[in-house]
Image: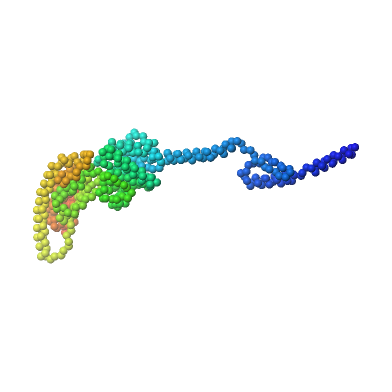
Amino acid sequence: MSDNKHIIENRLKRAVEEATPDVLSNVLKQIETEQVVLTAKTAAAPVTDYIVDESSEQITALPAQRPRSWVWFKAIVPVAAALMIALSFWLSLNYSTQAVVAFDVNPSIELSINRSEKILKVNPRNSEADAVIGDMVLKGIDLDVAVNALVGSMVQKGYLSEINNSILITVSSEDQAKGEQMQNRLAGEIDSLLRSFSLDGAILSQVSTEYDYYAELAEQYGISPGKAALIEQLVQADPTITYDDASLLSINDLNILIEARRHQLAKVDISGHSSTKAFIGIEHAKLIAFMNVGYSGAEVKDLKTDYGYVDGKLYYKIDFQINDLFFKYEIDAGTGDILKVESERELPSVTTYDDEDKAQKTTIASTATDTTAATTAKTTAKTTEVTAAATTAKTTDTTRHTPSPSPSPSPSPSTTLSPKATARQYIGAREAENIAFRHAGVNRSEVRDLDTEFERDDGKSYYEVEFEVGDTEYEYEIDAISGKILDYDIDD
């Protein structure tokens, strides 16, 4: 019985062993394969469980379950990125400088604006600009509102007036087309605004795409970038003008220079005419020069006039010829003061002649000297008449600098003598020369290399007369009013 029981147990054991598949080797092989795949794919999810299909002897890896917070993170990232883009756009729209608009009169003010033309920053570049801005808070307001406020303040404080009516608008923008649109709009707005104040403005406007370059020039010469850009155009049009000199002139004086010399500035638009009501006028300046030299103007030929400038002020340049003498005058445009006088004798053509001709030529020269003296006496009488008429007109001329709603007519030569212009009290360059010639004992016909200049020193006015006769050089200083010889030097 026990034998039978033992036999049955052995049979059952064999049956179970035969019924159970041998998958151990396959399991080990499958695990090795999964490890290789996991090593190649480092970003794959970690494997924590396996499902074993005994019928097909396959193993399936199950990824580990990520926490729920990871799902929320994946959903929030795109939203956050979109918000960041929107925020960057909003900041660029509202807080990024898209253009710099500058206004130059003598006050110089820069306004940095955003895409919406809101003021981001106000930069007053000089003390006059601080006075114009005062206690105004311009940051955050519209550009048009700020322009109205600033121009109104310039008019109220006298920086823009009938005698100083020029304003320069400079739009600095990398977008040329948008810059030009803003330039034209602002020029029109300011013109209308000045008219509302009964002012005929002269408006210069330009677009600059090289702000950094002009900012460096501005720093070098102590001016604004807008003014530096204008001077750059002027220097290119007229090489005789330098940055050093032009930087000292006001915008109105620069505009006067541009109009007088008829410069065409390619990148600058100009409307209206600059005011010259603060100046004595070119006709007045010519009269002062003619009276100073001792002629009424009838004998003048080859007359040329222009503007010059020194130490930030304009003066009139008047060149003319009387007989064989050339004269160059510099007369302060504002006061009528004679700043400088130069005279030069026209050299006669070279001729050869014998001793008999010499005697004859000496006689002719003596006759010419007498004729010149007679002519001088005659023209002196004419000058006296002109001076008397001009003196009568002094009261009228005193008011010519007073601003009026309409421009005053140009003064005529008989009514242009300024109270500040005292040409009548000077003896004149020609008389100074005659005094020197008499002292030296020579005739004018013998003189060569004649150079006469009007000088001022320690409040005294005098003529400096230099000339040569033969191998002798003469230098005289003669009081411009009394004709007294102050000093002289004769070098044999």
In which image quadrant can residue 116 be found?
Answer: top left
Which residue occupies 13% across, 56% down?
Answer: 444
In which image quadrant can residue 467 be found?
Answer: bottom left
* Position of residue 225 in the picture relative to residue 93 (left or right): left
Residue 370 picture location, percent across and down: 9, 55
Which residue occupies 39% across, 43% down?
Answer: 99
Q: Which residue lies most toward the top here? A: 135
Q: Quadrant of the N terminus?
A: top right
* Position of residue 339 in the picture relative to residue 46 (left or right): left
Number of numbered discs on residues: 0
Instruction: Please say if 330 is above or below 159.
Output: below
Which residue occupies 34% across, 34% down?
Answer: 136
Viewer-nearest residue: 299 or 352: 299
Residue 450 picture location, percent across and down: 18, 55
Q: Evaluate whether residue 250 shows in this view.
A: no
Q: Quadrant of the C terminus?
A: bottom left
Q: Evaluate whether residue 448 shows in this view.
A: yes
* Position of residue 313 in the picture relative to residue 425 (left or right): right
Residue 3 picture location, percent across and down: 89, 39
Viewer-nearest residue: 216 or 225: 225
Q: How is the image coloured?
A: rainbow
In which image quadrant can residue 183 be found?
Answer: top left
Q: Which residue lies most toward the bottom here? A: 354
Residue 358 picture location, percent across and down: 11, 63
Viewer-nearest residue: 158 or 361: 158
